[in-house]
Amino acid sequence: MTTKVYIPRDSSALSMGAEKVAIAIALEAKTRGLNIEIIRNGSRGLYWLETMVEVATEQGRVAYGPVKVSDVASLFDADFLSANVENTKPHALSLGLTEEIDWLKKQQRLTFARVGITDPISLTDYIAHDGYKGLKNALQLSAADIVKTVTDSGLRGRGGAAFPTGIKWKTVLGCEAEQKYIVCNADEGDSGTFSDRMIMENDPFVLIEGMTIAGIAVGATQGYIYLRSEYPHALVALNAAIAAATAAGYLGDDLLASGKAFHLEVRRAAGAYVCGEETSLLESLEGKRGVVRFKPPLPAIEGLFGKPTVVNNVISLATVPIILDKGAQYYADYGMGRSRGTLPIQLAGNLKHGGLVELAFGITLRELLYDFGGGSATGKPIRAVQVGGPLGAFLPESQFDTPLDYEEFTKIWAVLGHGGIVAFDDTVDMAKMARYAFEFCAIESCGKCTPCRIGSTRGVEVIDKIIAGKDTVKNIKLVRDLSDTMLNGSLCALGGMTPYPVLSAMNHFPEDFGIAKA
Amino acid sequence: MPALQTKIDGLIAEHQNMPGALLPLLHAIQDNVGYIPESAYTHIAKALSLSVAEVHGVVTFYHHFRTHKPGRHILQICRAESCQSMGSEALEAHAKKCLNVDYHQTTTDDAITLEPVYCLGNCALSPAVMLDDEVYGRVSAADLDSLIAEAKA
C-alpha cells in the first residue's frame, strides 16, 4: 500500500528546511522498503510548525511538526506512516488531525480554502477541490451581472486602499476601447505581509481564475501579474499554473469553448517599493521608471498603455472565484459594518505563533495577538504593533481591543492596509522606528513630488536631533509640521502615509522621544 | 568582450517586440550575465527606440538591477520592520563584520555580495535572509555563519 505524505513547497516552509526534510523522508522510506508518495502541497500557514509533515489516514490527514531532518528516523521508528488518531503513544511531534488543530479550526477560510490542502500546480487537484466553479458560473452570466455580483458581495480592495472592487470593474466595463487590461498588483512589499505570496505559491489557479473572471466581466483579453522579484518560488508556481491552464483551455483564445479570450503573463518587478502604487506599477509595466502618475485620469479609464485597466491586488482577485461560486450573499454574510467578508490576516514579527489567519472582519487585535499569536516570541510584553505595513500606524496596548474593520481603524487614525500585523516587545525603541519610517520613505521615494522626496530626508535628520536630545520641543514641532506637509501635499500614499508610523509613534510613545507622557 | 555583447544582442532580439519590453529584457540580461553592463545601453536603446538616458534612468531606478559584476553568491538581509522586531539589526552588523564588507559590496574572495532587502515575505519566521534564490527563516548569527561558510566553499 502506498501512503500519501504531504510536505509543503511554500517558501516559508522551505526557509525552515522543508526541501531537506522531503529528501530525508524519501530516502528513509526507500531504505526501509516502504511505499510512499510525497506530495508537495502548500503550507497551512502555521509557520511556527514548519516543516509540517502530514500523513493521509482513513480518518483524515495527521500532522507532525516542526519536523527537522534529525527527526525523520524517529518518525519512522514510531511508525508515523500508519498513524491513527487512537494511537495512545504518538510521536512527540504529532499534532493529531490537521483539521482539528485549534489554530486552524477557528479560522474561516474562504479565499484560502484550498491553501495547504492541494498540490498547488495540479489543475486536476484544483478542479477536484471546487476550482473553476466560479468561472463556469461567470460564463453563464452577462458582464453586467458578474460586476453586480462582485459589487453586491461588498468586496473591497485588499491591497490596502479598500476601494470597492465592483465599482472599479463597472468603470472599466463602461469604457469603450479596442483593448482593455487586467493587472494584478503582486508587488507585495509591506513588511509583515505574505498572504499574496501564499496564494501565488500555494494556490496559483485561484488567482488565474479570478483574473479570468475579471477579464470576462469588463471585456479585457490580456492580463498581467506584476510580481515582485523577491518571490522566485511564486514565479515558478504561477508560470507552471498558467501553462497548465492554457493547455487545458482555461486560458487562451476560446475559454472553455465560450468564444471568449483571455491571456495571462507574469511580469517581474525589480525591487522598487513604490511600484506597489498602482500608477507607478503601470509605468513600470510599460518599461519605464516607476514614477507615480497624476490622477485623474484614473487607471480604470486610462491605465496600461493608455487603455482602460483594472488594477487589483492578489487577494481581491483570488477572492472573486468563491464569490462567483457561492454567490454575493454568501460572502457578504461574513464581516461587520461596511467591511464585508473575510480578511487573510498575517501575524508577523515578534510573535510565538506567526502565520496566516483568515477570519471575518470584526476580530480584535488582542485576540489575534494572544489567542492566535500566543504572545511575543521573546516572552516579553508586547509593547507596540504596526498594522498595515511600513505606512501603517503603531498601536499601543490601549488600542488592542480595536476590531479589525476599515472604519474602526480610521477612527483611531490607523489603517488596516493589507492585513499584516507586526508585533514588537518592550525592547523596541519607538524613536528609532519613526526614524526608520522616514529612512524607508527616502530610500523608496520615486522622487516626483517634493514633500516625499525631500521631506523624508529632512525627517531623518530632525529625528536624529531628537534622538540626540537637541532642542527636543522645537524639533518635535518641526516633525509635526513636516508630517502635515507630507500628509497633505504628497502625490501618493508613500509620502502621504509615512507620517502615520512617525506621528503614531510620537503620540503613543512620547517617552521614547524624550518628552513626558501626557 | 564580443562574446558578452553577442549574448546580450541575442536577448535583445528575443525581447524587443514585447509590449513594455525594457524590464523583461533587463531581467533577462541580469539573469544571464549577472549584471547590466553599461556597454549594453546603446544597443538596448537603439532596439527599443529609447535614448541611452532613458535606459540608464530605468536601470538605476530599480534596486534589483546592478551595473557591476557581483560575487558568486548574493546574500540579502531583510531590514524591514518585522525582521527588526526579531533582531535583524544585530544580524546585519554580524554579517558586515564577518564578511568585512558593507552593503552593495563584494568580499575580497569574490564569493559573496551583500545586499539589503526590504521584506522577503517570510515575516512569520523573522529574521529572514535570502542566499541567491533561497529564503532562510529564524536566522541566528550561527545559522548565518554556516550559510556563509557553505557559500564560500
Image (cartoon, rainbow, N blue to C red):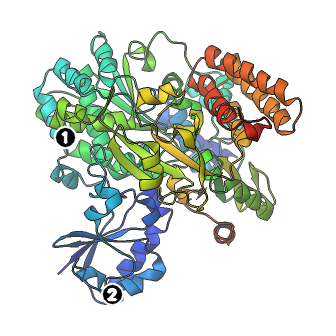
Q: Position of residue A175 (x, y in %)?
A: 31, 10
10 Å crowding of disc 2: few (<14), some (14-19), many (20+) = some
Say which residue appears at 23% left-offset and 37% top-offset: A321
Q: Mark 1 vs mark 2: which is more N-terminal?
A: 2
Tag 1, which chain?
A: A
Which residue in the protein does label 1 denote? A249
Q: Which mark, by number, is residue A78?
A: 2
Q: Position of residue A250 (x, y in %)?
A: 21, 39
Q: Is residue A168 visible?
A: yes
What is the quadrant of the N terminus of chain A in the image? bottom left
Do marks 1 and 2 share a subunit?
Answer: yes
Q: Is residue A252 visible?
A: no
Q: Quadrant of residue A315?
A: top left
Q: Nearer the viewer, mark 1 or mark 2?
A: 2
* Residue A148 left/right relative to A368: left
Q: Quadrant of residue A174?
A: top left
Image height of B62 relative to A480, above or below? below
Which amino acid is tagged 2? Ala
Image height of B48 relative to A434, above or below? above
